[in-house]
Image: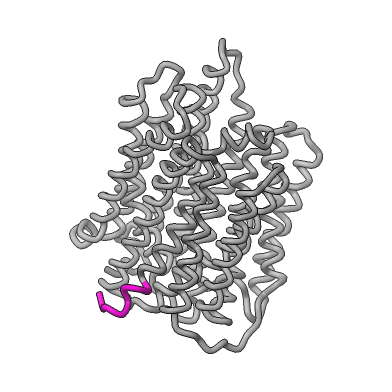
Amino acid sequence: MRAHLRPVLALILASYLMIVIDISIVITGLPRIRESLGFSPAMLSWVHTAYTLAFGGGLMAGARAGDLFGRRRMMLLGLTLFIAASLAIGLAVSPEMLVAARAVQGLGSAVLAPATLALLATHFAEGPERTRALGWYGATAGVGASLGMVLGGVLAELLSWRAGFFVNLPIGLGLLWMTARHVPRETPRAGRLDLPGALLSTAGMVLLVFGLVESAETGWQSGMGQGALGLGGVLLLGFFWHEARAPQPLLPLRLFDSRVRSGAYAARLLFLAGVIGFWFYLTQYLQGVLGMTPMQAGLAFLPATGVQLGAAMGVAALARRWGHERVLVAGLACSVAGMAWLARIGIDTAYLTGVALPMAVLGVGQGLALSPLTLAGVSGVAPEDAGAASGLVNASHQLGGSLGLALLVVVYSASAGHHGSTAADLAHRVAACLNLSAGLLGLSLLVALVCILPGPTARSRPLAS
C-alpha cells in the first residue's frame, strides 16, 4: 500500500470502528440502563432503534452532502455531532433524554459513515489495493461489534454503563485532529440536497418500525400501530416515486441496474436483520438465564471475536483462490448454521457446548461475509455515484438491523409462555428470537445464491479482485 494512504486508511478504520463499537457497546449495558432509568421492555429497544433509524434514515442525505460539500467537511461535522451526543447520553437522567440523544448520535453517524467509505472508494484504486482496504473495512465492522460487547460489559461492571459513551470523547477529539491534518480540502460541487427524498425515507422508516414496536407492546389490534405501519409503507412508496423523477435524486435508481449490487444490498439488509438478534438478545440470556454479570457477559462473546478476526483477515487469500462470491456464500452458510445451533439454547444449556461453540461458527460466518458484501455493494460504480453507493451500503446495514430488531421485538412479545420461572420464560423467548434470526440469515444466503454467485445464467460480471 502506498505510504501516503496509510494515515487516510487509519482514519477511515478508526472512525468506522468508533461507530460500530458504539452500536454494540450499549447492548451489553442494556440491563443496567433499564434498571437505572426505568425503561419498559418494548421502550428499551428504542435505545438501539432511535440510533439506527436516525443513522439509516439520514445516510443517503449524508452521502449526498459528502459528494456536494466535500468529505472532509462532512467528517468534521459528523464527528462533532457524535461527540456532543455521546456526552449527552452519558449525562442522561431519563429514558426520553437518552433516546433523543441517541437519535442525534445516529445523525452524526449518518454523516460520518458514508464519508469514510466514499474516501476509501476514491483514494484506493479498484483492484488488489481496494480489495485489501475493503478487507480491513469489513473486518472492522465485524470485530468492532464483538469488541464493543466485551468493552461494554467490562465498563458496565467495573465503572458504569455511562462510561461506554464517555470513552467516545477522547477518541472523537483525536479523530477530529486526524481529519483536519490528513484529509485534503475539496472544492464544493454544483448541486443541491434532495430534502423531500430525505424526509420521505426517514419518516417512512420511523413510522414502519414504530408500528412494529407499538404492536409488540399493545397487540396487533392497536389502531396506532396499524396506522403507523400503513402510513410508513405509503411514505416509502412515495420516496421511490419521488426518486425516479427528482433531477438530483438522493438515491439514483441506476444503482439497482446491476444484479450483483441489488443482491448485495438485499443480502446485507437481511444479514443484519438476522445478526442483530445475536447481539441484542443473547446478552440478556447470558445475564438473565446463565446469571453472568455484565463483564462476564461481555467476555463471553470473545469466542466470536477471535475467530471472526481470523476469518476476516483470511478473506483476501481465500478470494484469490475461490472468488469473493463463493467466500460470501460460505460465510452466509456458516452464519445460518451457527445461528440455528445457538437457537437451541434453554434454561439448562451449558455455555461451552451450547453457546461458545455455535458462537464461534457464527463468528467465522460473519468474518467471511461482511467484506465481500461491501465489495459487491460498490462494484462497478461510477465515480459520481460513489457517495450514493456508499450511503446505500450503510443504509442497508443500519436499516436491516433496525427492521430486524423490530420484528424480533414482536416475536419476543408473542413468545411469552407458561414456564415455571422468569429465567425459563426468558430462555424460551430468546430461543424463539434466534430461530427467526436463523431464518432471516437463510433468506440472505438465498439472495446471494440467486443474485451474486456467478453461474451460467448470471448476467452481471464477477466482482473485481
Q: Position of residue 383 (x, y in %)?
A: 45, 81
4 is within the stretch colored magenta: yes
Q: Is residue 182 visible?
A: yes
Q: Main secondary structure of the magenta part?
A: helix
Q: Nearer the viewer, residue 10 or 373?
A: 10
Q: Nearer the viewer, residue 334 or 314?
A: 314
Q: Which residues are magenta?
A: 1-8
* Residue at x 64% of width, y 72% of height: 244
Q: Nearer the viewer, residue 177 or 460?
A: 177
Q: Nearer the viewer, residue 388 or 34?
A: 34
Which quadrant of the rendered structure holds the N terminus? bottom left
Q: Is residue 257 visible?
A: no
Left or right relative to 456: residue 300? right
* Residue at x 50% of width, y 86% of height: 186
- 327 in relation to 117, above or below: above
Name the quadrant containing residue 251: bottom right
